[in-house]
Image (cartoon, rainbow, N blue to C red):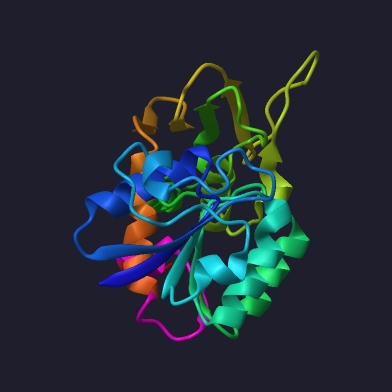
Amino acid sequence: MLKVAVLGAAGRMGRAVLSCVFEADDVQLIGAITEPGDRFLGRDAGEVAGVDPVGIPLTDERKQGLHAAQVAIDFTLPSATEANLRACIESGTALVIGTTGLEDRQQKAIEKAAHEIPVVYARNLSVGVNVFMDLVGRAAKALGDGYDVEIIEAHHRHKVDAPSGTALALGERIAAAKGRKLGDLGVYARHGRTGPRVPGTIGFAVVRGGNVVGEHTVRFIGAEEQVEFRHEAADRKTFARGALRAARWAAGQAPGLYSMTDVLGLARD
């Protein structure tokens, strides 16, 4: 039985992870951690997830919540990432991170922590999205420079970062296929007299509204044809189930920084 703790248990994604943990017959919830002052603090994790009580109250003490956990799943905020990493190192707990919008400081903290514990980091933990990204990368390499690339993403009105981490990861994958970096090719805004498109650039468009869970479309537009890839998430549980798959895999790994490419056994370029 895999012993799991959830960081950010009271959030939208945290509750989805809790729900999936309770549905699984090979996973046991050990701890549920939230931020100080959260309205769910002290509430039973089962009740927070909408099921019967399980006898594990939400705590703001990382040490308490991580005690005896083999793996922690982190869907919090970038501001909490470094403290979460330190707590997992102290408890010897492997960590799966699905938090998006991380800055360079947090990225470097992840890389440093991976010398001591297994860390799976992905800007999107959905199994389908990661297969989708693999296919997009292969297409970009095969199609070459004769196709303009546009990435369109849509999310709910509460999402705070744009473009989404998944859209950026897609852009990075496409740029790498061209032998370039996204920072050299990305176009994030168009307004007014922009002039003709610069060959080789990767355009981004962002939609925010309602309760859209997550939609990503990549269009390769050539002079005589178009190739389009699309992924749509209908429920946050798709990310939660991917996180649990990553957690099961991470529990048996040596310290290191891993991605969903490793978890799913997808070929690296």
- The residue range painted magenta reads 251-264
Q: Nearer the viewer, residue 96 or 121?
A: 96
| Place of residue 62 in the rendered image (x, y in percent of width and height, measured from the top left) | 60, 66
Quadrant in the picture for residue 213: top left
Q: Nearer the viewer, residue 73 or 29?
A: 29
Q: Is residue 57 above or below residue 145?
A: below
Left or right: residue 193 versus residue 56 is: right
Residue 37 seen anywhere in this rendered image of the structure: yes
Q: Can you give x and y, in whole percent of width and height, for residue 116 in the image? A: 58, 85
Between 244 and 131, the residue placed more toward the observer is: 244
Q: Where in the figure is residue 174, as x and y percent of width and height?
A: 52, 49
Q: Is residue 110 above or below residue 187?
A: below
**Which corner quadrant of the image does residue 264 belong to?**
bottom left
Instruction: Report the residue at 45% width, 63% height from top.
Output: 5
Q: Is residue 126 visible?
A: no
Residue depicted at 38% across the width and 52% down the height: 130
| Quadrant location, the N terminus | bottom left
The reply to whether the magenta stretch includes residue 257 is yes
In the rendered view, would you say 123 is above or below 49? Answer: below
Going by the picture, which residue comes out furthest to the top? Answer: 192
* In-front residue for pair 235/53: 53
Left or right of residue 139, residue 168 in this image: right
**Residue 139 at what x, y percent from top left?**
39, 47
Quadrant location of the C terminus?
A: bottom left
Q: Is residue 123 magenta?
A: no
Q: Quadrant of residue 217?
A: top left
x 35%, y 36%: residue: 50
> Residue drawn at (64%, 42%), measured in percent from left and top?
38
